[in-house]
Amino acid sequence: MINSKDMNKVKTPDDLKKLREDLQGKIKLRESGGHPESIVQVRVAMATCGIASGAKEVMTFFMEELEKRGIDAMVTQTGCMSYCYAEPTVEVTLPGKSPLVFGFVNNRKADEIIEKYIKNGELVDGIIPVTYHTITEKQQEV
Amino acid sequence: MSKYKMNILVCGGTGCKSSASDLLAAALRTELAERGLSGEVQVVVTGCFGFCEQGPVVNVLPDNTFYIKVKPEDAVTIVSEHIIKGRKVQNLLYTDPATQTKVDGSGAIDFNKKQLRIALRNCGFIDPEKIEEAIARDGYAALARVLTESSPEEVIGIIKKSGLRGRGGGGFSTGLKWEITSTVEADQKYVVCNADEGDPGAFMDRSILEGDPHTVIEAMAINGYCTGADKGLVYIRAEYPLAIERLKTAINQAREYGLLGKDILGSGFNFDIELRYGAGAFVCGEETALIHSMEGNRGEPTFKPPFPSEEGYLGKPTNVNNVETYANIPPIILKGADWFSSIGTEKSKGTKVFALAGKVNNVGLVEVPMGTTLREVIFEIGGGIKDGKKFKSVQTGGPSGGCLTEKHLDIPIDYDNLIASGSMMGSGGMIVMDEDDCMVSVAKYYLDFTVEESCGKCSPCRIGNKRLHEILDEITKGNGKPDDLDRLRNLSEVIKDTSLCGLGQSSPNPVLSTLEHFHDEYMAHVVDFKCPAGQCRDLMIYTIDAANCVGCTACARVCPVGAIAGERKEVHSIDQTICIKCGACLEKCKFNAVLVS
């Protein structure tokens, strides 16, 4: 009998590698456009400071409204996006597109993002351009 | 699908806005509407591109053309040339300073990316409460590699070669610290993560723990493998409830996946982590005080040596590193020491996260390669000074650091350069001050903090800082004398030389650096009894300008202490012996008749 507690165990480095590839594959599937699994991803920056400036309300709004409006989307929390001057910040990834970060998102802005960007792909004011390099994408290429 | 074929992104960051980017956006919209293109081309106002010195910045999509220093009157040209005829407007393109050629395509996109995220690589990307997302982004891959492919000595060799230095403030070689802990013989050793982030204004450690807790867990396990410790402790302040919650979740998930606990990844290596809570005392960021606090004793430092690496928690060898230091470890293992040491300056490798705050437009966390200049951080990434004011000073290193000035702006930031200029890296707080900030008050503010946070164990720190604070307080109240400045300097040197721990050894830095760089401002306080920045209330004198006063009585009615006398329609006057310098009259007067000097 397998102990249910041991189900998740990663017992060898190969297990970890397999798990990583598996998870990366799932994320790729999610991100690739045109696939049945392709859905809209919304990430809300939920560090203490983000929450203090209203990120929790915005996240709830996205979850409730996307469901109400029948949009297949995944709303998740994430850590600090480092744009303290523009909290709350939200990243939206449409299938097959690069992620876009929006700043100063309140419920009204969230509504605009859903109606214009998520539904029609139209940009809305308040996009925060990416101003940094990260090492992770390069790592994944290898 | 979007009905728009093209987008014109106009930077609406505060820096660009102050050079009329909002008028530019409006002009573009008008021009597009006049030519009947509103339905095809959309103008979008964005946040800061981080290239404020060249602002306003415009980015045309989908061809990804960057225009700089665009004025509202350029809207016509952009629409008629670029949008209609498809020809890029040459004179608005960015010129690469190195090659003197115009940059227009996607290559241009890199010009403004001054930041490189190593420690913050996963912050804001992964869900910190899902270990799966961390694993998908190479979480625990470095641990797996270390456990299967390398001996502890080899790993320590990599860390040493990478040139990584402690990110908590001291800047001690991380690899060397690991090596010392590993070579001491003991039946039990400990790995400690210092998450007692105490500098006012610094919050990078909290952000890392809240955004990517697994990287810290992984790095601590790697350290355990290298030093021979099977137990890790995170000393975190109870004021960080969310960071604690996320860290706990992460530790539990790592245990479930077998990435913490016994026989990790079949290697025979055991490691587990527990949390220890601090009550938020600044001195507990000092490693010996931190260890005493973890042991349940008073959070007071003790003399080093012995160093914690030799004799730490419960008298056992203990490796203490800061959160940001740990966050750098997994990428170094995966990408190699040479990669890491290729970033940064000769003696400071990699990147540093700064918490940029104060009078800058883009307050935020900034991770830049060592060697980036203060100017780049403040004026490009930070978007310049708020409300178009003049830059005065930047304080780095928190209460232990110093204030730097205009002449330091082009110094490449690294541990040694900052110390040479009279400040320090500290944990990476960076507070920007403008012309309205009084440097004597700034020094007093930091002393306020140090006096409050001194543990009281050694006299120079306990009494000396208190006296420093008193002298500064008298100066800001108009009771200072010129020889106070010498007393400040002498006392500061004594405190630095004789204090027991880093707190007292560095607490006079804000005083010394302001004395050196803003001597004139101190002199103005003690000779002319004036505060040039207009911050020291007791030094201000409010008077009424007889030429402008119409005798409306508004000021007299608003004065809370009845210091203003005067009949209706006659010139009023302020009784200086009663005036408490609250400034209410100044705010109320509609005729510019209240003068401040």
Image (cartoon, rainbow, N blue to C red):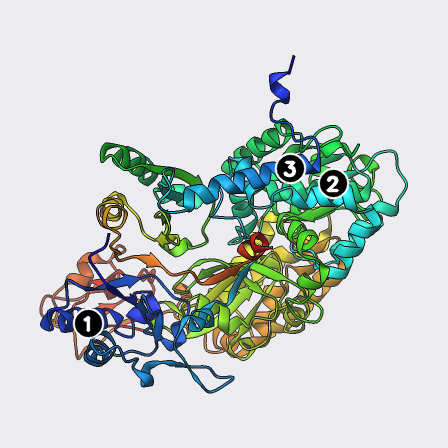
| Of residues B181 and B416, the one drawn nearer to the viewer in this rendering | B181
Q: Chain of mark 2?
A: B
Instruction: Find the distance from the CA under tag 1 to the CA under tag 3.
Output: 53 Å
- Horizontally, is B369 left or right of B183 in the view? left
Q: Are marks 3 and 2 in contact (CB under 8 Å)?
A: no
Decide: is B183 above or below B241: below
Q: Say which residue label 2 marks.
A: B191
Q: Say which residue label 1 marks.
A: B28
Q: Is residue B49 visible?
A: yes
Residue B26 sits in quarter? bottom left
Decide: is B324 above or below B45: above
The tag on residue A16 is 3
Instruction: Find the distance from the CA under tag 3 to the CA under tag 2.
Output: 24 Å
Mark 3, Cα crowd under 10 Å, few <14 / some 14-19 / many 20+, is many
Percent position of residue B113, x then y = 47, 67
Q: Secondary structure at mark 3?
A: helix
Instruction: Find the distance from the CA under tag 2 to the CA under tag 1.
Output: 59 Å
The tag on residue B498 is none
| Of residues B185 and B289, the one drawn nearer to the viewer in this rendering | B185
Q: Secondary structure at mark 2?
A: strand
